[in-house]
Image (cartoon, grey):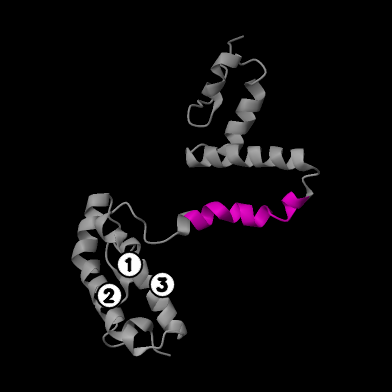
Amino acid sequence: MTDQHELPGVRFLGDSPGDGQFPIQSAEQRRAVRQELSAPLVADLERWLREQRPKLSRGNDLAKAMDYLLKRWPAFTRFLDDGRVCLSNNAAERALRGIALGRKSWLFAGSDRGGQRAAAMYSLIVTAKLNDVDPQAWLADVLARIAEHPAHGIDELLPWNWQPRSAPESQAA
């Protein structure tokens, strides 16, 4: 079987340097590399699609796919002008993975209120993760001190403000 990278005359957009192969830190650097390396490939693709599309009948499945892409061309090519745009949706897929895995378990929340509580807890845990806070450490700490914490300072316990309680100093005997 032939490796896809050995096909003559075929270039793959996902192989562009700066999009995984060579990590580039800043969005401006990614944009510059995409303009230099990916933009010509994308222009070739658009030209080819526009040349080939009239050769297909309207009902053809490939023609429908081509029409879909061509109608959304500005959205498809947005990554060329904005280095902040990620070329994959892997981060979103990973974020949703826990929801998909727990879906059947959550059918047994016991009641609507139980489901609402589970959703609230899930939101807090995901918020902690998004703020680079260990959810287990955060939740254990917050639950241990929330009863004694003043109500007017409750925002101090939210994941984006949370500071772990310093360990009590051992006293000399």
**Would you name the residue on which mark 2 appears?**
46
Counting from the top left corner in percent of width and height, residue 97 is at 58, 56
Q: Which of 57 and 84 is in front in this view?
A: 57
Residue at the (48%, 27%) spot, across then down: 161
The residues tagged by marks 2 and 3 sit, at their Cα atoms, a distance apart of: 13 Å
| SS at mark 3 in the image | helix
Q: What residue type is labelled 2?
A: Glu
Dots 2 and 3: beta carbons under 8 Å?
Answer: no
Residue 99 is inside the magenta segment = yes
Q: In which quarter of the image is residue 9?
A: bottom left
Dots 1 and 2: beta carbons under 8 Å?
Answer: yes
Q: Nearer the viewer, residue 72 or 164?
A: 72
Counting from the top left corner in percent of width and height, residue 141 is at 61, 27
Image position of 31 (left or right of 108): left
Image position of 42 (left or right of 87): left
Secondary structure mostly seen in the magenta stretch: helix
The residues tagged by marks 3 and 1 sit, at their Cα atoms, a distance apart of: 9 Å
The residues tagged by marks 1 and 2 sit, at their Cα atoms, a distance apart of: 9 Å
Residue at the (28%, 76%) spot, across then down: 45
Magenta stretch, residue numbers: 92-107
Q: Which mark is residue 159?
A: none
> Tag 3 or tag 2, which sits nearer the N-term?
2
| SS at mark 2 in the image | helix
Image position of 107 (left or right of 145): right
Q: Nearer the viewer, residue 64 or 30?
A: 64
**Would you name the residue on which mark 1 appears?**
73
Q: Give the answer, above or below, for where 57 lies relative to 106.
A: below
Q: Which amino acid does label 1 sit on?
A: Trp
**Would you name the residue on which mark 3 appears?**
68
Q: How crowded is mark 2: few (under 14 residues within 10 Å), some or many (20 or more)?
A: some
The N terminus lies in quadrant: bottom left
Q: Residues within 10 Å of mark 1 (few under 14, many from 20)?
A: few
